[in-house]
Image (tube, rainbow, N blue to C red):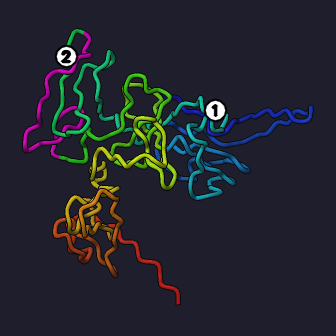
Amino acid sequence: MAPRAACLLSLLLIASARVILVDAICVPVETSYCGDDPAILCRDCEGMDKVPNPLDCSTYYMCKGPGVFLFDDPLPCPDGQIFNMIDSECSPDAECQFSCGSTNEGGCFYTCDNDKDGMIADPFDCSVYHQCTGTSGTDPGPAQTCPADEPYFDGKECVADESACCHCRPYCYEGDIGKKVEDPTDCRKFFFCLENHVMPTIPGECRDGEHFDMHAGECSSTAPCMTLCRNVVDENGCIDPYTCQETGFFPKCKTQCLREYYHCVEVTDDYAPTETCSDDLVFNPDTLQCTRSESCPYSHQYVPLDPVPA
């Protein structure tokens, strides 16, 4: 895909019957770039310039000079709008140009259509898949189950890596363009649909005290929390949010040694807060205990606690 300019190289403003030429010298941002490095996004920008957030097209960054963000965090577009890379403004008609974090790059689909004649996943069972059949490849065949030693379907084949699962991901079915669809792993979140038969990548989140109403397609303060899939392992091997289906201690990430972990004292559908190992210890996903980082068999991320004020 060809690069789009993050800022207009020559923006012609007409104000008070005067023509003012503003030269914004932001270099183009390659749509294949997936990161938030201001040295790249704000490279050669002068003054206050808006640039896209490649990881979330519904937000953008504000540069205050070459290679520097004005704020470390991205700024949100109004609800339902996308940051337009052409005019560097949020717009309800803009299209997301980046594919960063796309969940369907590996070939995960829930429906057969005319553009594809491969295999489709079951929306809620990671071990089940269907082969698309028929003269146009639009008819799902009978359900097939992955073998016990490779129980997870990744969109193309059965694998042993649980984080490669195609199940429990958002999906835009026929007629969903311009609508919001639920995040099956978190009743407080949703996604914007820009195309049919794809897994959307532009997220949204309800206000505090609201849940996403799957029937109305909007957030509501009266809608119950309907999380369709609980404790799904993401591509990093982590679970967030976590609900307590049994009591005990549980890792936030199954293949990482982090300081954070979950402690369930009762079975509940509420989201469990994280607890933190003390001192310089990390949580071992195998032993389910806090231990020294050198004894943990996985990579670890140690971040010191903030000092207690005197």
Q: Is residue 35 left or right of residue 75?
A: left
Amino acid type for the residue under numbered disc 2: Thr
Which residue extends farthest top? 135
Label the magenta part by its dominant secondary structure. loop
Q: Which residue is mark 1?
A: 86
Residue 11 on image: x %, y %: 76, 34
Of the pair 127 and 52, the residue shown nearer to us: 127
**Comparing labels 2 and 1, the label whose residue is closer to the camera:** 2
> Looking at the image, which residue is at 15% across and 45% down?
160
Of the pair 235 and 2, the residue shown nearer to us: 235
Residue 50 on image: x %, y %: 65, 45
Of the pair 291 and 271, the residue shown nearer to us: 271
Magenta extent: 136-160
Packing grade of label 1 (10 A; few <14, some 14-19, many >=20) is few
Cα–Cα gap, marks 2 and 1: 41 Å
**Magenta-span inclusion, residue 187:** no
Which of the two discs, 2 and 1, labels the residue nearer the N terminus? 1
Q: Is residue 175 left or right of residue 122?
A: right
Amino acid type for the residue under numbered disc 1: Ile
**Magenta-span inclusion, residue 151:** yes
